[in-house]
Structures are given as structure tokens and as C-alpha cells.
Amino acid sequence: MSELRVDVDGVAVSPEHFIDGRRVGSADTFEDRSPLDWSWKLADVARGTAHEADLAVSAAGAAFPGWAALGVEARGEYLDRLADLIDRDIERIAHVECLDMAMLEESLRLRVISRGARNFRAYAQLAREYRARRWSSNGTDNVVLRHPAGPTVVITPWNAPFMLSTWKCAPALAAGNTVVLKPAEWSPLSCSMLMDLVDEAGFPPGVFNVVQGFGEEVGAALVNDPRIRRISFTGSPETGRIIGEAAARNLVPFTAELGGKGPFLVFDDADLDAAAQKAAVMFDDGGQVCLAGTRLLVHDGVFDEFVAKLRAASDRHVMGDSRAADTTLSPLIHPEHLARVRGFVERARESGDVILFGGHEADDEGLWYRPTVIEPHSNDAEVVQREIFGPVLTLQRFGDEDEAVALANSTQYGLSAIIYTSSQERAERVGARVRAGTVWVNCFLVRDLTAPFGGIGISGVGREGGDYALDFYSDLTTLQIKEGTTHG
């Protein structure tokens, strides 16, 4: 292993790729800066090219037969060891990821990084528990066999990079595939730390690789490589279309989670205090959460009361250093992203939308943007129809269930939705009509790892979670044997 390390506020982190069980540098690097203080350069990170992509895919291809042949029990032992190491290093990983992408360190330490360990354990166990479907028909005995598919490319976003990488890589590895992971260039460091743990867990060289760099450079080379047999991506619909085209050219199965514009429906029988508190949670992490309910749809009869409660709940947010225990609102990831969020709000103001509160950056210098609620002039307004991915919510009225559902389903997105109502019947009735991959009622961000996860419309292709993910990362064979075939 290379000894090249950078000191990230007391934590030693490799800025290099991890390919075929060793650290690999590049001829060029890119700067990784902290959103907490943009003058703070965390590292010069190895900038991958088609050369490093080729090395990683070659390593994954060479390691695949051996890893696939191990079987679910032996592979599960590797994944369990890796999960134990993640649990051991939660505080170190959380601290670096906080500095790298600015999510609240307390949240990372108490919930998010540990979810990475849970992902590896859960998929190791799900793979062990798999029971092939068996049945008889038309004079044959039938069984569905699940085979590892081959080298897999996983491309993950800059928000919650560690957890989201494990969410995709864990089922791929458990299914028997080898993996090349390309983390987002805005927050690559925690995925590099994951590779140190992969090495410590004793994974065979080439089974799990990381290549860093830009999508149009190393990412494009990875997804266009004909040796790759699965691609999984989380990011924007625009990039998803490009990757999907590459997958189609090579006839490679492709799954993508492509962002959301989730409706947050508040009915007149809802607990308004709970609904307003949860709506204010949508500002957490600077609003950089794809599953957030960013379109508030509120019944006419409780609209004014809800707005007052939402304003009060939002006023309790504290902008500050994400390492501080009392901070509840983190900065945006990058100056380019801040400019993007600012642009949405400025165009909304110019088009006649009403800024109910917020609508500008914090008084202090930095990448913080104030919690913002906009009442649009039309359901066709840009802020209603496009994903902003910042601390900006829209607020609209509805008169009855039909209008609420029509508004909820009026965008091209369909990743998630939130409903607040005290009625079980309404929850089931409206929940079944809302077009979304996941619908939460009187709660948010509750995840069962065995449930299907994914988007509808431009929010994604395919499903992850549980056996849905393991099936995606596998080739399925139906074996049919004529009844009466003798043993021996």
C-alpha cells in the first residue's frame, strides 16, 4: 500500500485510487475543498482517466471468477468483517465526511455511517437466506438459479457519499459481483476511507475498487467499457440519460435513482404541529436530500395555521459549523451549487412567485442559504416543476383529495411523497393514488432495507433494496428437468 496520506483535521486519508488491492496515483489531481470554509483545501485528489478506468475494470474482471465461486457464506464473512470495521471507525469517517460535504457530524455519527455497516450485514444475510423458487409444471421440475452477473460499475452522488455507496455496493458484492466505485468529485474522501477498511478486511485484490475523478473523464470510460455487466447510478436525470445510453449500447442492465420533487400533503385532519415540524426537517442538510418533500400541498381549511406553524418551526433552525452540536442547518456543498439554488429563487421572484420567507443567503460569508418558502404563481412555475436540491420549498393550496392527488402527480418526478392525515382510510386511499416509489404517512425517511426502493418517471429506472437488488445484480436461469429423470 502507498504511504501517501493527507491529514484531514487529524485523520489520515489517502487521496489516491484503490485498484487491485493497492493505492494507485494519477498524473493529475483535482482540489477537494470543505463547504464549511471554502478556503480550506482538504486534499489534492488523484484525477482518474480512461487509463485508471481500464486498470480498475481489468482488475475487477480478473477477480470476478474467484469471488463468484466463493459462494454466499464465504462472501458474507468478508462483508460482515467490513461492517465491523465500519462500526469501529464511525467517528473518524463521520468527521471526514462532515468536512467533505458538510452534513451534520452528529447525524453522520449517530445514524448515517452506521447505516453503511447495516447495509453490508443486511445484504450478506439476505444472500444467505435466499431460497430458489421451485415448482412443477407441464411435466417438468423447475428451479430459478441466481448467478453473479460480473464486474459492476457504481457511480454515487456527493450527498451522503459513504452510505449511498454502501447501499449499492453491498448487494453487488453479496450477489458475487466485483465492483468499481466512482464517488462524486465534490466529496470523495469517505469512500477512500472505505477502501482502507476493505483492505483491512482482507478482500481479495480486484474485488472492490475505487476510481476518483470527473464523470466526463473517468466515469464515461467506466460506463462505456463493454466488459462491465451491471451499472448503478444515483444523480441527475441529465446524467442518467447519458449513462443509460452507454448501458444500452452494450446491452448492460442499468438501475438509476435520479432525484425527486416530492409532494408533502397536509390534510385538514392532520396533526399540524407534527406536520409543520416535519416540513421544517426538509431544510436539513441544506435541503440536499433527494427524498425530501419539497412541494408543500396544504388543505385550504388549515393553510394559514399551517404556514404560521411552519414559519415558527423553520425559525428554530440554527445555521453554523456542521461539527457543532447546536447546528441544524448545514451549508451547501459547493459555490456552483449555491449559485444554482440562488438562481432558482431569483427567477421565481422575477416571475411573480411570492417569497413567504427566506429567499437569500445567510448574512455571514460562506455557502449557507436561508430556509426559503415560495408560494408560486402557477403550478407550472419552474420552482414547482424542477428539482432545486437546496433549502427551498414551495407551498400550494388544495380543496379536496382529488385536487391534492392531481397536484401531487403533476411533475415528471416520482421518487417519494409524504402524507399527513389522522385517517387510516385516507392514508391508504391517497397513498395508493400518489405516483411515487415510496410514500410515507405521518413519518419520513423510515427505511426497511428489504423493501423496494426507486423512482417513477424521471426519478429513476429499476428498484433497489432486498431481493430486488440481489436479483438486479444477478443473472437468472430457469432450469427445467423432465419429471422422471433418474438420479446418478
Image: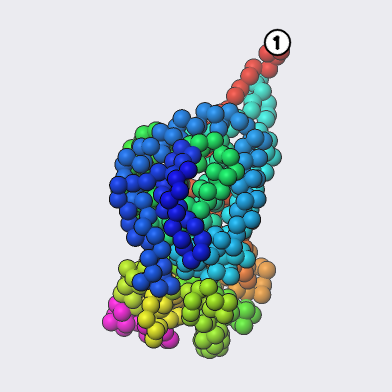
Is-magenta flag for residue 348?
yes
- Going by the image, does 115 lie left or right of 157? right
Query: Looking at numbered disc 1 in the image, what kind of residue is underneath it?
Result: Gly
Q: How many marks?
A: 1
Is-magenta flag for residue 311?
no
Up-down: is 384 above or below 244? Answer: below
Relative depth, front residue between 180 and 39: 39
Q: Residue 472: x percent and y percent?
A: 52, 41
- Going by the image, does 346 lie left or right of 63? left
Which residue is at 32% across, 68% downward?
336
Q: Which residues are magenta?
A: 346-360
Up-down: is 484 above or below 10? Answer: above
SS at circle 1: loop
Q: Residue 149: x percent and y percent?
A: 50, 34
Residue topped by disc 1: 488
Which residue is at 52% across, 82% downward?
317
